[in-house]
Image: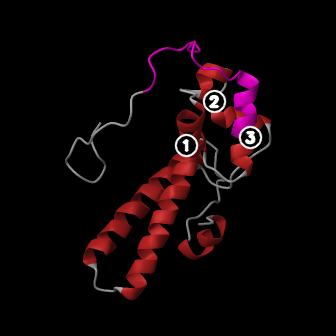
Amino acid sequence: MARLHSRKKGKSGSTRPPRLEKPVWVERSGTNVEEDVVKLAKKGQSKSMIGTILRDSYGVPLVKVVTGKKISTILEENNIKTSLPEDLTNLVKKALIIRKHLENNHKDLGANKGLQRTESKIFRLIRYYKKKKVLAIDFKYDPDQIRTLVAR
């Protein structure tokens, strides 16, 4: 798939495990993995970081293969919710960092263009999440107010 703001193709991410059944070498049961997911989420880890930690530290290739549920489903069942979706949160953090940089470096035109591109992605995501009813219909992106929603 092509990149959004360049003419390059880009490289895809890591490949997922090809099998959809639990590997023989995974020692943890589904309930143990669910407990670990909840414990890591309560510590403040994001969904992607939870998956990475379980993969690297506990040897769980995919949470869905071991438990039969996605990480987001496990978190919903345990009433652990975030104010914004993870991808939107990451983009907002990036935009806030660029804005802070531009306060000190007014003439940095490259950073200004980067801010425009990042906020373009934010507006696209907000439109998508409003359509899917993940965000409220009256949700507005205001950099000064969203600073409180996104904790660094």
Disc 3 vs disc 2: which is toward the camera?
3
Pointer 1 or 3: first along the chain: 3
Q: Secondary structure at mark 2?
A: loop
Q: Do the CB atoms of the residues marked 1 and 2 lie less than 8 Å apart?
A: no
Q: Label 1 to label 2, Cα distance in Å?
A: 11 Å
> Does 48 sit left or right of 124 as displayed?
right
Residue type (three-letter) at the residue carrying disc 1: Ser
Q: Is residue 57 above or below residue 115?
A: above
Q: Residue furthest right?
A: 78
Query: Who's the residue at 53% across and 40% down the image?
Result: 52
Q: Label 1 to label 3, Cα distance in Å?
A: 13 Å
Of the numbered discs in the image, which one, if any, rests on residue 48? 1
Question: Label 3: which residue?
Answer: 38
Residue type (three-letter) at the residue carrying disc 3: Val
Question: Label 2: which residue?
Answer: 70
Quick check: is 93 in the magenta stretch?
no
Badge 3: how crowded within 10 Å, few (<14), some, or many (20+)?
Answer: many
Quadrant of image for the N terminus: top left
Q: From which residue to which does the magenta span run?
A: 16-38
Query: Who's the residue at 65% across and 71% down the image?
Result: 148
